[in-house]
Amino acid sequence: MKAIIPVIIVLLFSGCSYQIRHDNLLLYPKTETQYGIIYSAYPVKQSITNEFDTIYINLNKYLSQDLSVDTRLGNVTVGILPLSNPVCDFAKRGTTTFTYVKPRIIYLVDIDHIPTNITEKYGNAPSDYYQNGFTHELTHVLTIQSNHFSDSLSMKERLAIFCSFLDFTSTPITISKETTNFLKESLKDSFTDTKINDLKKRSLKSLTIVNSYDLVIFMLYLFETNNTQMLKELVKSNNINKFIRKVNWNNENTSDFISWIKSK
């Protein structure tokens, strides 16, 4: 996997609080979409505006109907900006995507105009960068103000990462191609033989919650195996122990999860 991919994905875990000048978005040309406005220094491809609208529809439907998560609807503003711009400093924030939930403004780096020295060092961005980043931040915009997510499960962020790993540009919703490739490369590192043995002994209690993809991978497992009710309960749970009790998770379930991991 090219270097820029884990850089982008890992930075999605990051939080930040740096000065922002939302008003300077008005310095850029705007493109209107069905569900908001995109500001960008360069013309926005019609395929991107269409996909953003489709993601908005499908993501909201999935969250509200499939996962029973409360969503707050309304127009969204998106800034697709160069690394150097008068609105925000992506470098100081240490991230390529972020959002301000209350004003419903999402910021994405314009990866189509990245300086050559950066692409030579890190490689090209993943093909679904805009879809991935927009989905991640839109999940925050739709859900954070209307729900109380578990801090012990870091569910506010884990739900956004999980959703960003799905392809909402069409239906039925599937795990994205980039995520499929990511799983092939990361599962062996995340779930070593030692980790698998610990999973057999301690079941889901062995999952690392903080600064780890363990819980997101488990959520992808529930999604791909159509365990929607369990996934819904996990999103609502205060901690992993309450989830285990609520769904009556047993050794057979753990074995099935391990088989899924090994099949990848």
Image: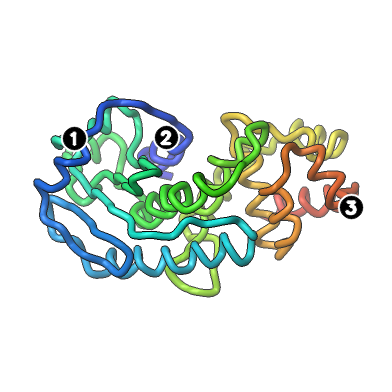
Residue type marked 1: Asn
Tell how many labels.
3
In front: label 1 or label 2: 2
In front: label 1 or label 3: 3
Q: Secondary structure at mark 1?
A: helix
Spatial separation of the CA atoms under disc 1 and disc 3? 51 Å
Q: Which residue is the site of mark 3?
A: 252
Q: Which residue is the site of mark 2?
A: 11
Within-10-Å neighbours for mark 3: few <14, some 14–19, many 20+: few
Q: Residue furthest bottom?
A: 171
Which residue is located at x 35 percent, y 26 percent? 17
> Which of disc 2 and disc 3 is earlier in sequence?
2
In front: label 3 or label 2: 2
Q: Nearer the viewer, residue 141 or 196?
A: 141
Spatial separation of the CA atoms under disc 1 and disc 2? 20 Å
> Which percent across, then down, holds residue 90?
27, 33
Q: Which residue is the site of mark 1?
A: 117
Question: Left or right of 120: which side holds 17?
Answer: right
